Image: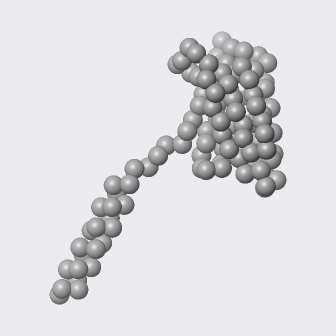
Amino acid sequence: MRRVAWAVMVMAGVLLAGGAVAQTAPNRYVFTTVDAVDLNSITLTVTGVLEGESAPSSHSVYFVSSAPLGDAQLSGCERKALLAMSKPGQYTFSITQLTQYGVSCKLARVAP
């Protein structure tokens, strides 16, 4: 009987500890204008005005450059950011750091 009680207490502690761990949301940046794009082997830094803000700021995301998919994803994000930069006010560019080195980029047309 003591073993059962002990097992129940251990499982309750594990469940409570697991529930207490806060899940962090991915870093997501939505730029209404893009002023600069800086690219190196594993980092894409975008400078521009974030949605809801009035002053420009810079934000960086990190890619795994050793994988071919990482290189393709990095250049794809760069192209989207450059398009947003070339046509200010017509697009929003969002970039999200999903995991330590996983990134999602999105280019969206602003409704007229």
Can residue 91 be seen at all in this image of the molecule?
no
Name the residue rendered at 32%, 64% in the picture: 15
Image spot of residue 6 (x, y percent) = 23, 80
> Where, quadrant-wise, is the C terminus in this rendering?
top right
Vertical position of residue 15 compared to residue 112: above or below: below
Residue 76 in the image, given as x and y percentages of width and height: 79, 38
Q: Quadrant of residue 60?
A: top right
* Left/right of residue 95 with respect to residue 37 in the rendered view: left
> 63 and 12: which one is in front?
63
Residue for point 75% across, 20% down? 85
Q: Is residue 11 toward the left or the right of residue 48 in the image?
A: left
Instruction: State how many labels appear.
Output: 0
Q: How is the image coloured?
A: one colour
Q: Is residue 75 above or below residue 57?
A: below
Q: Left or right: 59 with respect to 42?
A: left
Q: 28 and 61: which one is in front? A: 61
User: Along the line of sight, which residue is nearer the eye, 41 or 68?
Assistant: 41
Farthest residue, direction left: 1
What residue appears at the point 60 percent right and 27 percent down from the top-left corner?
A: 30
The answer to whether residue 22 shows anywhere in this view is: yes
The percent coordinates of residue 61 (x first, y second) are: 66, 40
Could you tell me which residue is drawn at 69 percent across and 29 percent down?
A: 46
Q: Is residue 22 above or below residue 109?
A: below
Residue 41 versus residue 79: which sits nearer the camera?
Answer: 41
Q: Quadrant of residue 90?
A: top right
Location of residue 101 with respect to 90 vertically, above or below = below
Image quarter hosting the N terminus: bottom left
The answer to whether 7 appears left or right of 100 in the picture is left
